[in-house]
Image: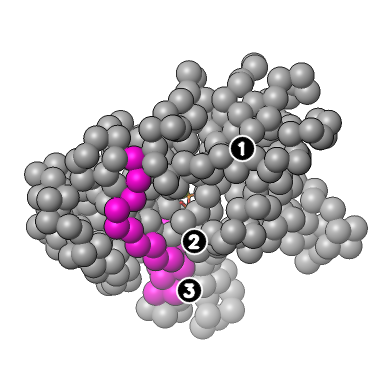
């Protein structure tokens, strides 16, 4: 399959690619497995994810992004190189690539991402603001002088932004998103039931059982882990009501950050948001009861975008068509010297 324009959502949990014409074309977890003896990357994506908690000591499972920040440049670059080569295998077609980077990324980290994309064979590379991409992908027309508010709750970070005329007017980012919910659930189960559970089990509990509104849902799941009392494998049933406290605590932090952004939003834009409501994107927004909880706390309608996991990737791809109309939310980051270099894989 040949693509000329590719949008990449470089997420803490997943790397997703889309084209403006075909929508989502690629999705893999942002995980790699490193053999520490030979210092080589032996698996990436799904293959590496299957090794989590099951690999021998010499294999290190690396999640190169944490809390919306790049922690491991080498693995990030390796993932971009390998994944982009899968989507665009031809050496003859050099795509224009837009990358949506975490809001908290530094200039040096952005440069490293740009280099990886260029080294993978891109002709040009653009950087896109995550909330701008999320709003575009959710189908909002952000070019008009009308305020809209988007809260992107991913795996590593929650990015809150008020957007008007193609750029952010007010924004905030906090490291409280899907992964923080998983850790908080795991800690809580360990303290309450003396049962140590792995991160994949905690994530499953969040998706299947957890809910921010106790009266809305009652689910149960049998979890298996390691008993802290007997030091042996153990299992027990965990109910929605058991997880209410840890989930609500983190939801309250997201609500407080959104409240702060709303408070500092100029009145005309705040009036638009009051009328049109807030849109949630990102996988974390699918936590049961979260939209309703935020609506209650902020006194504004809150809706989850259709297909929230893919909004950012779709919007990043679309930004390649709308680029010049998006103000600060989109910029050409192609290094000048790279243009003359031969294609390298
Ligand atoms: N049904 C669900 N209920 C609750 N959480 C979910 C559900 N489905 C996915 N998630 C969570 O969504 C998160 C991943 O979302 P997403 O793919 O938007 O993150 P990301 O873009 O990789 O991260 P970031 O934007 O922070 O860099 C994970 O924490 C995952 O557990
Ligand atoms: Mg994201």
Residue at (29, 57) in percent of width and height: 170
Residue at (57, 29) in percent of width and height: 6
Q: From the viewer's perspective, is residue 285 above or below residue 238? A: above
Q: Is residue 51 visible?
A: no
Q: Secondary structure at mark 2?
A: loop
Q: How far apart are the two marked residues, 2 and 1, measured between alpha carbons?
A: 19 Å
In the picture of the structure, the residue carrying the numbered disc 3 is 195
Residue at (28, 66) in percent of width and height: 257
Residue placed furthest toward the front: 336
Pair 3/1: label in front: 1
Horizontal and vertical percent for residue 82? 73, 38
Residue at (74, 61) in percent of width and height: 60
Beta carbon of the mark 2 residue lies under 8 A of ligand 1: no
* Mark positioned earlier in the residue sequence (2 or 3): 2
* Mark positioned earlier in the residue sequence (3 or 1): 1
Beta carbon of the mark 1 residue lies under 8 A of ligand 2: no
Pair 2/3: label in front: 2
**Quadrant in which the N terminus appears:** top right
Asked whether, in this view, residue 262 is left or right of residue 135, the answer is left
Q: Secondary structure at mark 3?
A: strand
Q: Is residue 316 visible?
A: yes
Identify the mark at residue 125; answer none if there is no mark.
1
Callout 2: few (<14), some (14-19), or many (20+) C-alpha neighbours within 10 Å?
A: some
Callout 1: few (<14), some (14-19), or many (20+) C-alpha neighbours within 10 Å?
A: many
* Mark positioned earlier in the residue sequence (2 or 1): 2
């Amino acid at each position: 399959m040949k693509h000329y324009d590719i949008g990449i959502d470089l997420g803490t949990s997943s790397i997703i690619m889309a084209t403006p014409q075909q929508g989502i074309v690629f999705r893999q977890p942002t995980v790699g497995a490193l053999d520490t003896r030979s210092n080589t990357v032996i698996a990436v994506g799904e293959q590496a994810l299957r090794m989590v908690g099951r690999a021998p000591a010499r294999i290190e499972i690396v999640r190169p992004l944490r809390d919306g920040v790049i922690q491991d440049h080498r693995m990030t670059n390796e993932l971009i190189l390998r994944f982009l080569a899968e989507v665009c295998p031809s050496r003859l077609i050099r795509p224009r690539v837009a990358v949506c980077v975490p809001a908290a990324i530094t200039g040096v980290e952005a440069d490293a991402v740009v280099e990886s994309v260029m080294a993978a064979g891109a002709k040009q590379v653009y950087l896109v603001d995550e909330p701008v991409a999320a709003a575009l992908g959710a189908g909002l027309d952000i070019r008009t002088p009308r305020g809209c508010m988007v809260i992107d709750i991913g795996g590593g970070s929650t990015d809150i932004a008020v957007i008007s005329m193609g750029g952010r007017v007010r924004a905030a980012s906090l490291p409280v998103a899907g992964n923080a919910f998983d850790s908080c659930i795991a800690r809580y189960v360990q303290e309450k039931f003396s049962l140590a559970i792995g991160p994949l089990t905690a994530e499953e509990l969040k998706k299947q059982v957890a809910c921010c509104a106790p009266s809305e849902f009652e689910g149960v799941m049998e979890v298996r882990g390691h008993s802290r009392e007997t030091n042996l494998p153990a299992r027990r049933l965990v109910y929605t009501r058991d997880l209410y406290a840890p989930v609500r605590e983190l939801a309250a932090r997201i609500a407080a950050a959104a409240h702060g952004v709303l408070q500092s939003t100029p009145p005309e834009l705040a009036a638009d948001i009051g009328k049109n409501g807030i849109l949630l994107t990102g996988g974390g927004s699918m936590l049961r009861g979260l939209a309703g909880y935020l609506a209650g706390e902020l006194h504004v309608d809150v809706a989850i975008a259709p297909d929230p996991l893919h909004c950012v990737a779709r919007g990043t791809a679309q930004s390649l068509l709308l680029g010049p109309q998006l103000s600060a939310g989109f910029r050409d980051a192609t290094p000048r010297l790279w243009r003359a270099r031969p294609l390298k894989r």
